[in-house]
């Protein structure tokens, strides 16, 4: 069984097409089909059902696919570690971030990283803080940027605090509050809100603040991205509360200081179990030295 055969199987499974899989793998279709047929003979089972209209995994193929992916990932990690041993940083880097990250200039950091390590393939995943933390723990991504209430701290991962910030009110330019220098939560509680989904860290910051003040509010709109929140606010449909460091990036809205605003903390996190050479190099761009990354990992494994 060869790694190339596994790559072909994964490509066909992901594209549902021998033609598209061959294009992805930069090989002629006949060669790809031959290698998969050869692997099927070796395994004694068909991996794909082939018809004139579609290609899909057989039960045997579905059982084979996860192991094939694990083998390919292990082979890539091994090649990456060998490259790192001779001073090269290669492989992949998956970075997760919340939509409102403001403590770090992510595009600028990636620009600096790319200049130093052009052989690393980078993927960015935007999501909620709790989801990103879980993906780091599972090894699906290597580094993530979170925003949490001051009452919470990342669990099960290594973390460094990057910055603290307070939320501001975001309203339409013609909103009655737009000319006010500041407001408080009691005044805002009379407004219709847009916010992130319940049980997300971004939503918890505001929910906890209103609850602590003995106030309730009407969250009529729930969305997953801050930029779309701003678009709804700009139409006069609602108001929002967003980090003050992030709010200047928005257009078509007005921000107002909130005297009793909740605070949040931004973190960068990485795995307690292992840190790839690419992730270690990226953390170094953020002034987190490799020695600190290694010391924390070793401490957590002891």
Image (cartoon, rainbow, N blue to C red):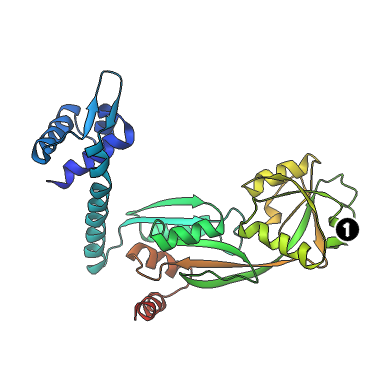
Q: Is residue 254 left or right of residue 13?
A: right
Seen from this angle, which residue lies furthest front? 59
| Outermost residue to the top | 52
The image shows residue 278, relative to residue 58, as above or below, that is: below
Residue in view at x 20 percent, y 33 percent: 27
Q: Which residue is identified by label 1?
A: 187
Q: Residue at x 38, y 61 (%)?
A: 116
Residue 1: give x, y in percent of width and height: 11, 46
The reply, left or right, for residue 82 in relation to residue 147 is left
Residue nearest the observer in this picture, 64 or 22? 64
Residue 149 visible in rendering: yes
Using a 10 Å C-alpha cutoff, classify the residue at mark 1 as few (fewer than 14 neighbours), some (14 to 19) or many (20 or more). few
Query: Residue at position x 65%, y 45% from top?
Result: 223
Residue 165: percent from the left, percent from the top? 68, 67
Dividing the image into 4 quarters, which one contains the C terminus? bottom left
Q: Position of residue 184 (x, y in %)?
A: 85, 63
Residue 103 lies in quadrant: bottom right
Q: Residue at x 11, y 37 (%)?
A: 44
Looking at the picture, tell me which residue is in the foreground, 270 or 119: 270
> Is residue 244 visible in the rendered structure shown here?
no
Q: Secondary structure at mark 1?
A: helix
The image shows a total of numbered marks equal to 1
Which one is nearer the viewer's eye here, 223 or 40? 40
Q: Measured from the top left, where is residue 183 in percent x and y? A: 86, 61
Q: Nearer the viewer, residue 95 or 193?
A: 193
Q: Relative to 93, is 266 on the left or the right?
A: right
């Amino acid at each position: 069984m060869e790694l190339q055969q596994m790559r072909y199987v994964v490509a066909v499974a992901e594209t549902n097409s021998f033609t598209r899989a061959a294009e992805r793998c930069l090989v002629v279709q006949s060669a790809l089909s031959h290698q998969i047929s050869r692997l099927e003979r070796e395994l004694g089972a068909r991996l794909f059902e082939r018809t004139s209209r579609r290609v899909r995994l057989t039960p045997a193929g579905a059982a084979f696919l996860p192991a094939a992916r694990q083998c390919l990932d292990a082979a890539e990690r091994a090649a990456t570690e060998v490259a790192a041993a001779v001073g090269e940083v290669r492989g992949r880097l998956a970075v997760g971030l919340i939509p409102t990250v403001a403590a770090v200039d992510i595009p600028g950091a990636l620009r600096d990283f790319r200049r130093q390590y052009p052989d690393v393939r980078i993927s960015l995943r935007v999501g909620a803080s709790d989801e990103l933390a879980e993906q780091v723990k599972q090894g699906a991504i290597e580094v993530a940027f979170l925003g949490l209430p001051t009452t919470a701290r990342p669990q099960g991962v290594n973390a460094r605090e990057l910055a603290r910030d307070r939320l501001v009110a975001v309203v339409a330019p013609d909103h009655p509050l737009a000319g006010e220098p500041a407001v408080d939560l009691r005044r805002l509680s009379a407004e219709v809100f847009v916010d992130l989904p319940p049980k997300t860290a971004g939503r918890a910051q505001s929910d906890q603040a209103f609850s602590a003040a003995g106030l309730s509010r009407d969250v009529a709109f729930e969305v997953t991205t801050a930029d779309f929140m701003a678009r709804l606010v700009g139409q006069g449909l609602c108001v929002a509360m967003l980090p003050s460091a992030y709010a200047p990036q928005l257009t078509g809205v007005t921000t107002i200081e909130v005297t009793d605003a909740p605070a949040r903390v931004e973190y960068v996190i990485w795995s307690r179990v292992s840190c790839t050479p690419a992730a270690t190099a990226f953390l170094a761009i953020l002034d987190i030295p490799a020695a600190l990354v290694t010391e924390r990992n070793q401490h957590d494994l002891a």
